[in-house]
Amino acid sequence: MSSKGTRGILSKQSEPIEEGGHMYTKIRGGRHEGDASLWVEKIVTTKEEAEEENLNSPP
């Protein structure tokens, strides 16, 4: 795997989430699937980062 792992954040299958990696999410009885670079602008893991980004639903 690439060394571009994002601060040790893992998927439900315990695989590192990487820039440009392939991801999917369940939504409305189906699922959306594609490359992370299409959906993920930035991964926020702390309250401080969430405040800087003005997120509505921080982690």
Image (cartoon, grey):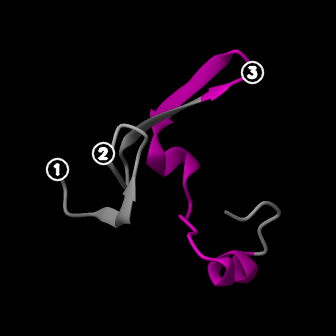
Residue 31 lies, with reference to residue 6, above or below; the image says: above
Q: Is residue 57 magenta?
A: no
Answer with the quarter of the image where residue 54 lies: bottom right
As shown in the figure, which amino acid type bears the numbered disc 3? Arg
Q: Is residue 29 magenta?
A: yes
Helix, strand, or loop for circle 2? loop
Residue 25 lies, with reference to residue 46, above or below; the image says: above
Label 3 sits on residue? 28
Answer with the quarter of the image where residue 6 lies: bottom left
Instruction: Looking at the image, tell me whether mark 1 or mark 2 is earlier in sequence order.
Output: 1
Residue 29 lies, with reference to residue 57, above or below; the image says: above
Answer with the quarter of the image where residue 49 lies: bottom right
Q: Position of residue 42 (x, y in %)?
A: 55, 65
Nearer to the camera, 5 or 35: 5
Label 2 sits on residue? 15
Taking the spot 74% from the left edge, 80% from the top edge, the residue there is 51
Taking the spot 53% from the left edge, 64% from the top edge, the residue there is 43
As shown in the figure, which amino acid type bears the numbered disc 1? Met
- The quadrant of the image that shows the C terminus is bottom right
Nearer the camera: disc 2 or disc 3: 2
Residue segment shown in magenta: 26-53
Helix, strand, or loop for circle 1? loop
Nearer to the camera, 37 or 45: 45
Instruction: Looking at the image, tell me whether mark 1 or mark 3 is earlier in sequence order.
Output: 1
Taking the spot 35% from the left edge, 45% from the top edge, the residue there is 21
Q: CA distance from mark 1 to mark 2?
A: 10 Å
Labels 1 and 2 touching (C-beta < 8 A): yes
Label 1 sits on residue? 1
